[in-house]
Image (cartoon, grey):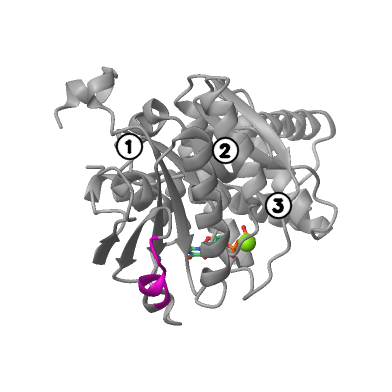
Amino acid sequence: MSNSDRRVIAFPGSELPPFGLTIVVPAYNEAEALPHTHAKLTAFARKLKDERGLPVEILYVDDGSRDGTRAVAETLRPDGADVQVIGFSRNFGKEAALLAGLDHARYGAVIFMDADGQHPTAVAETLVSRWLDDGYDVVFTYKAHRRDEPRLRTLFVNAFYGLVNAGVRHKIPADAGDFRLLSPRAAAALRRLPERGRFFKGLSSWVGFRQIGIPYEPDAREQGEAKWSFWGLLAFSIEGLTSFSIVPLRIASLLGALLAALAFCYGLFIVAETIIHGRGVPGYPSVFVAVTFIGGVQLLMIGVLGEYIGKILSELKGRPVYLVAEHSLKRAADQPAAT
Ligand code: UDP
Ligand code: MG
């Protein structure tokens, strides 16, 4: 792709994949949950086909699981929907799995749904209706409340969105999840974004078009356990922050300027005091405090710079976001052939 087509993306209808819906399901150690989820999804697919004539494909992305998730996925029947299975060469993370889903989707519209069955198909039906009936391009969901989550996590999440959205034009909707529908042109737009560091919530807000959010109540996870760790979430937040905001850099400059100004005033004060009272300078403690404090702030700010430079490096290396080890496709009996 040349630089010029990266900047201007047009959507003549003929370039879009065929009419239909791909449900992308990232799965990491979900062998136990997968058959249950698959039963729900195929029922949903049959309903869409009967009621709206919408061909559906379910795309499982096995994110390098160690519990035989891929073997289980291979046994799932293409019952009313095509079933595609992609296996990564190792665990690349959910964002990479979502991107792989987007890349391999054979139909135009895409829905992202978790493998643990926490995303109700009834809500997915609403997403489809907002797209087909009301013409929205990005239909995202957000949790109706966070009552059952730890306080600390809620605090962390709010601080994160406050920081990301400070002073930017394309605000990332707070609380929005990955559970969302992309119309064919929104999906095509996302596919063409060149960056490797992926933060889907932010990117799908950035592409614009007609967007709408829908509150929902996630179902309880029935099998397995949630895969996020504190450090995982922290890394994810830093990724999101550095791809969508330069506020941390600005804070660094402001804080630096403020400290320098304070130090300057204090310097003037000391000079004045020496001239007026002519006394020597005791006060090693204050010097010690000032030096360590400024040293700490400097290290912190260098760390902030480092985050952004690390990001430049990883974009520069241009490594693929994921590697596919296995790939299979089973067609449903009465499905029109997609590409
Ligand atoms: N997941 C993944 N790769 C990972 C971690 C998670 O593909 O490295 C998948 C996981 O299988 C599930 C979804 O991402 O389908 C959400 O994960 P989880 O249920 O652990 O998180 P939560 O529901 O708390 O957001
Ligand atoms: Mg979950």
In this view, the residue in front, 103 or 72, is: 72
Which residue carries the number 2 mark? 248
Q: Secondary structure at mark 2?
A: helix
In this view, the residue in front, 176 or 168, is: 176
Ligand 1 shows up in the quarter that is: bottom right
Query: Hey, what amino acid is under mark 2?
Result: Pro
Which residue carries the number 3 mark? 287
In this view, the residue in front, 318 or 25, is: 25
Q: CA distance from mark 3 to mark 1?
A: 55 Å
- Which mark, by number, is residue 191? 1
Q: Earlier in the sequence, mark 3 or mark 1?
A: 1
Q: Name the quadrant containing residue 330.
A: bottom left
Query: Hey, what amino acid is under mark 1?
Result: Arg
Q: Which residues are magenta?
A: 72-78
Q: Quick one: which residue is furthest to the bottom in this view?
A: 67
Residue 139's spot in the image, x, y percent?
A: 57, 32
- Which mark, by number, is residue 325? none
Q: Earlier in the sequence, mark 1 or mark 2?
A: 1
Q: Secondary structure at mark 1?
A: helix
Residue drawn at 64 percent across, 32 percent down: 173
Q: CA distance from mark 2 to mark 3?
A: 28 Å
Residue drawn at 39 percent across, 41 percent down: 55
Q: Is residue 317 above or below residue 258?
A: below
Q: Secondary structure at mark 3?
A: helix
279 in magenta: no
Looking at the rendered image, the disc whose residue lies closer to the viewer, 1 or 2, is 1
